[in-house]
Image (spheres, helix red, strand yellow):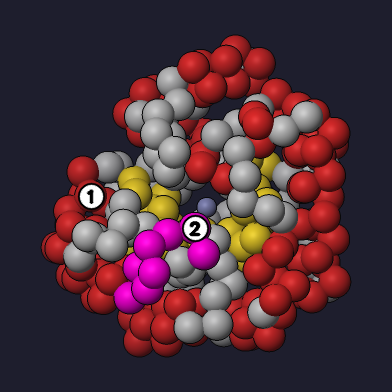
Amino acid sequence: MLGGMVGVAVAAQIGPAGTWLPSLRRALAPRLCGPMPPGTVAITFDDGPHPLGTIAVLDELDRLDWKATFFVLGSQVRLFPDVVTETLRRGHRVELHGDDHRYLIARPPWSAAADLERGIDTIGEVTGRVPTWWRPAYGVLSGPALLAARRLRLRPVLWSAWGRDWRAAATRESIVGDLEAGDLAGGTVLLHDSDVMSDPDSWRSTVAALPLLADRLAERGLTVGRFGD
Ligand SMILES: [Zn+2]
């Protein structure tokens, strides 16, 4: 099952910051899209921790009384460990995005495994907890990385809706519009609390979009649940 899926994933990959089409992915691999109970949606953030972006996101999540999941980079965790502990202190989940943000398919097989292991070790050292979920960089899976993830007891997960919030041109309206173009109900939202892989200060638009997203979710009768709970 996973082997065939990987081939399709790689073949359908599009664009440097993009990934394969969400609708295609959802049809082929629904469990990878972060399914949530009906009527709920999970909010997730990639590429942190970031000393400004993550804290601003945490403050807005507190205002909205939302709990979220942060897929962090080991390289960023080593730079800003206090931001990770603060994320946990506020009741959010911290999982693995990778150690270094590179396409796993561009790496030799042992390199993909080493990346996951280093990321796990770094998160473990800072939080005392081993991550159990993994979202690959760019949403691109590779066979060796999937095998390594299985050995390391990491469950891969992607998303069902994204805000395309890494772009300087993104606004609160465009972010929420892009999210609504995806599958929100019973799904998982991808946003970014960091600009290390994005246009500078892109997280500011992400933060601004959260209250508007809250309004839209309320209109649809959707509530926020935390991914992986
Ligand atoms: Zn990323």
Ligand 1 neighbours mark 2 (CB distance < 8 Å): yes
Residue type for callout 1: Asp
Relative to 218, is 160 above or below? Answer: above
User: In this rendering, would 123 be left or right of 219?
Assistant: right
Q: Which portion, as a residue range, is magenta?
A: 196-204
Sequence-earlier tag: 1 or 2: 1
Relative to 137, is 118 above or below? Answer: below
From the top left corner, tell me how far across and down residue 36 is, in percent: 44, 48
Of labels 1 and 2, the one closer to you: 2
67 and 109: which is toward the camera: 109
Asked if residue 200 is among those painted magenta in the image, a careful observer would answer yes
92 and 16: which is toward the camera: 16
User: In this rendering, would 187 be left or right of 184?
Assistant: right
Judging by the rendered image, the residue that carries numbered circle 1 is: 178
- The residue lying at 38 percent from left, 62 percent from top is 199
From the top left corner, tell me how far across and down residue 156 is, in percent: 63, 40
Say if residue 58 shows up in the picture: no
Label 1 element class: helix
From the top left corner, tell me how far across and down residue 166 is, in percent: 36, 58
Say if residue 205 shows up in the picture: yes
**How crowded is the residue under tag 1: few (<14 C-alpha within 10 Å), some, or many (20+)?**
some
User: In this rendering, would 52 be left or right of 161?
Assistant: right
Label 2 element class: loop
- The residue lying at 71 percent from left, 55 percent from top is 99
Q: Quadrant of the N terminus?
A: top right
147 and 185: which is toward the camera: 147
- The residue lying at 72 percent from left, 62 percent from top is 74
Inter-mark Cα distance, 1 to 2: 19 Å
Judging by the rendered image, the residue that carries numbered circle 2 is: 197
34 and 53: which is toward the camera: 53
Asked if residue 99 is among those painted magenta in the image, a careful observer would answer no
